[in-house]
Image: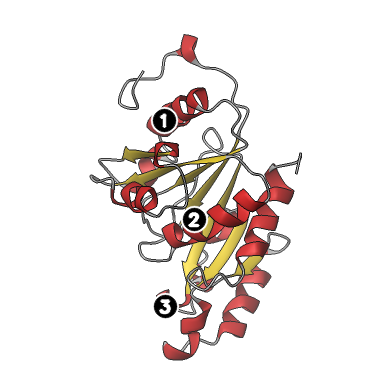
């Protein structure tokens, strides 16, 4: 079976790896976040693989394969061919099949990360695809993002405000932005990060381990 073939019901096997999604607008730092997470999770003994989504390219997958951070064979690419949310929400078949193929190749996997293509604030993940999902926004997108109450911001299991180092350079009151996000999300967590410097990445790894990797 290839990632372009329909998923056959008799080929479906129970997944043993936890599956998480990472979504967010274009340029918010999703791929940089994954790059920062790989060594932190690996140091904790987490065996992982990654599936990236792009519209009509494999750009993010190729970036991760070239990074030297992970075996390139553990990175698969899905070309959405339409709005990025289509293959993570409306019909996640391509992603499910790609995940099943990677898991068959590496049966000891603990964690599979699905990176959505850059999308708008309405982007959400189907729970048929992932067990838990992260939505990433960045301060350069505007301090008013939480107030817009997009489904991605409101429904995700973990909201990450990335590129916090840029706040003073783009006129964003980071404290206010975080306060509004936490107020709107209630008990759902909000974390901050600077994926380039590594600030906040350990806390994100902790959240993943605590929420979906119960054996660690």
- Above/below status of 2 relative to 181: above
- Above/below status of 127 relative to 169: above
Side (left or right) of 60 relative to 133: left
Q: Nearer the viewer, mark 1 or mark 3?
A: 1
Among the two numbered marks 3 and 2 on one chain, the one whose residue lies closer to the N terminus: 2
Which of the image's four quarters has the N terminus? top left
Among the two numbered marks 1 and 3 on one chain, the one whose residue lies closer to the N terminus: 1
Which of the image's four quarters has the C terminus? top right
Where's residue 33, x and y in %?
49, 61
Q: Nearer the viewer, residue 32 or 161?
A: 32
- Above/below status of 97 relative to 37: above
* Residue at the (39%, 55%) spot, across then down: 67
Circle on res. 110: none
**Mark 1 packing: few (<14 Cα in 10 Å), some, or many (20+)?**
many
**Mark 3 packing: few (<14 Cα in 10 Å), some, or many (20+)?**
some
Q: Quadrant of residue 198?
A: bottom right
Q: Nearer the viewer, mark 1 or mark 2?
A: 2
Q: Secondary structure at mark 2?
A: helix
Where's residue 160, x and y in %?
56, 65
Residue at the far right: name it. Answer: 215
* Residue at the (25%, 40%) spot, across then down: 81
Q: Can the viewer see residue 150?
A: no
* Residue at the (52%, 73%) spot, across then down: 197
Among the two numbered marks 1 and 2 on one chain, the one whose residue lies closer to the N terminus: 2
Circle on res. 98: 1
Q: Nearer the viewer, residue 38 or 111?
A: 38
User: What residue is pinned by disc 3?
Assistant: 140
User: What residue is pinned by disc 2?
Assistant: 34
Q: Secondary structure at mark 3?
A: helix
- Cα distance in 3D space between marks 1 and 3: 33 Å
Residue at the far front: name it. Answer: 68
* Residue at the (35%, 62%) spot, across then down: 26
């Amino acid at each position: 079976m290839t990632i372009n073939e329909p998923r056959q019901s008799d080929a479906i096997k129970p997944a043993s790896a936890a599956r998480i999604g990472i979504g967010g607008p274009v340029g918010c730092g999703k791929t940089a976040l994954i790059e920062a997470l790989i060594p932190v999770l690996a140091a904790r003994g987490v065996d992982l693989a990654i599936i990236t989504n792009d519209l009509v390219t494999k750009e993010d997958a190729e970036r991760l394969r070239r990074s030297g951070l992970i075996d390139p064979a553990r990175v698969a690419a899905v070309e959405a061919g339409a709005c990025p949310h289509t293959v993570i929400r409306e019909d996640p078949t391509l992603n499910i099949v790609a995940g099943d193929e990677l898991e068959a190749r590496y049966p000891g996997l603990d964690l599979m990360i699905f990176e959505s293509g850059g999308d708008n604030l309405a982007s959400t993940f189907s729970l048929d695809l992932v067990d838990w999902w992260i939505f990433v926004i960045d301060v350069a997108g505007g301090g008013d993002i939480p107030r817009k109450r997009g489904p991605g911001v409101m429904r995700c299991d973990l909201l990450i405000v990335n590129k916090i180092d840029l706040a003073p350079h783009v006129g964003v009151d980071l404290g206010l932005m975080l306060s509004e996000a936490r107020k709107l999300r209630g008990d759902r967590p909000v974390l901050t990060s600077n994926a380039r410097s590594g600030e906040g990445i350990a806390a994100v790894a902790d959240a993943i381990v605590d929420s979906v990797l119960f054996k660690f």
